[in-house]
Image (spheres, rainbow, N blue to C red):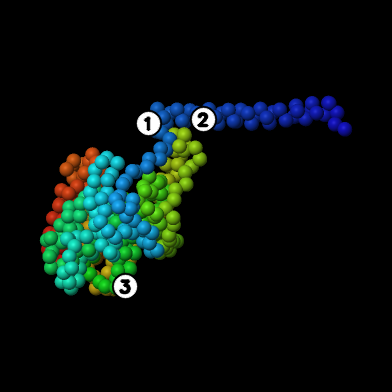
Amino acid sequence: MTTSREIFLRLAQSRPRILVSAIGFVLLLLFFVGAELILRLEGAHPWQKREVRIQVSPGGTFVATHPTVGYTHIPGKFTVTLDTGYSFHVTHLPNTLRITHALDNDKRTRQKKEIWIFGCSFTHGWSLNDEETYPWLLQERFPEYEIVNFGVSGYGTIHSLIQFRNELAMRRPKVAVLAYAEFHDIRNTFPRERRKGNAARTKLGPRMQPYARLDGEGNLQYLMAQDEYSEFPLMRYSAFIHFIEIKYNQLEERFLRSHAVSEALVKDMARLAKQHDVKLVVAGISPDPSTIAMLHFAQENGIPSVDIAVDPSVKEHTNAPYDPHPSALANMKYADKLEAYLKAEVL
């Protein structure tokens, strides 16, 4: 049997280890509390998940899942009302794409050569009525062509490439315009930062997300994932944990080399266009360094490019305070620049 003396000796031997562990725990707690206080004093805060309230009538949504691009539009006429009370009208054709002219049964439109425009919400025309979008305005200026608006909110270059490949299996256009912006880079690799941003935009319906990675030899690998986001534990309560999560996301994005992936996607799209005798144009639609770099990259690789961006700091170029997306005036300027370039350099 264990004697009282042996028990006492064991406690005496373990006391230093317990003391060291206790001191370590207290120091760790003090570090955590200190870091939390400093970050909050500097304006950092825990993550707050904000739901974007959007009302779509009829139906409550106008997107549905799609096997290759992840999600696409639902055909029909819709009224979208933002949480600011601002409303706009959207019409999608039976092929899910937004209209670029009044609906009619004129068979001559099917006989025209086509100009396809690929892009995101800027091209789709989020927060604008149908007739205010720049693809609609271009249709008015190019009546001899059929302008096709492939833009969808949330799309990146990878979506445009998949759409392009899918459509070329059935027909081909005269010209394809790829509207590119810097923020498309993380849409193409779908890192945590993109998933986090999407967490507030779940009300438009189910979403899958295609994305790409560069392997060790620089080749593109195409993948598909559910649009889901996993929070770090306690980041809704701790500014320090949220700060760590932000830094982790930034490191991940650098590791994925999202801009290099975008460049590879553009080259793939250019190769596909060349195989089908389609003139591809890269149009920079946002005024930022990565977009300018992409236009230079396109030119260096023999791909025509044009800068159609406007200054978003000019109040009249956005729908602020109701929505930050480009205004009708900005879309008019997009159309002006793209029209001039296409007439002078492409058509």
Q: Which residue is label 1 attached to?
A: 43
Q: Residue at x 38, y 59 (%)?
A: 65
- Identity of the amino acid at label 1? Gly
| Figure check: 10 above or below 187 | above
| Left or right for 32, reference 173 | right
Which image quadrant for residue 300? bottom left
Give the spatial CA distance, label 2 vs label 3.
60 Å
Which image quadrant for residue 157? bottom left
Q: SS class of the residue under badge 2?
A: helix
Q: SS class of the residue under badge 1?
A: loop
Question: Residue 203, image x and y in percent?
Answer: 36, 48
| 2 and 3 marks in contact (CB < 8 Å) | no
Q: Which residue is label 2 attached to?
A: 31
Residue 14 visible? The answer is yes
Q: SS class of the residue under badge 3?
A: loop
Q: Which residue is label 3 attached to?
A: 169
| Figure check: 1 above or below 282 | above
| 2 and 1 marks in contact (CB < 8 Å) | no
Give the spatial CA distance, label 2 vs label 1.
18 Å
Pointer 3 or 1: first along the chain? 1
Which of 201/42 is in front?
201
| 3 and 1 marks in contact (CB < 8 Å) | no
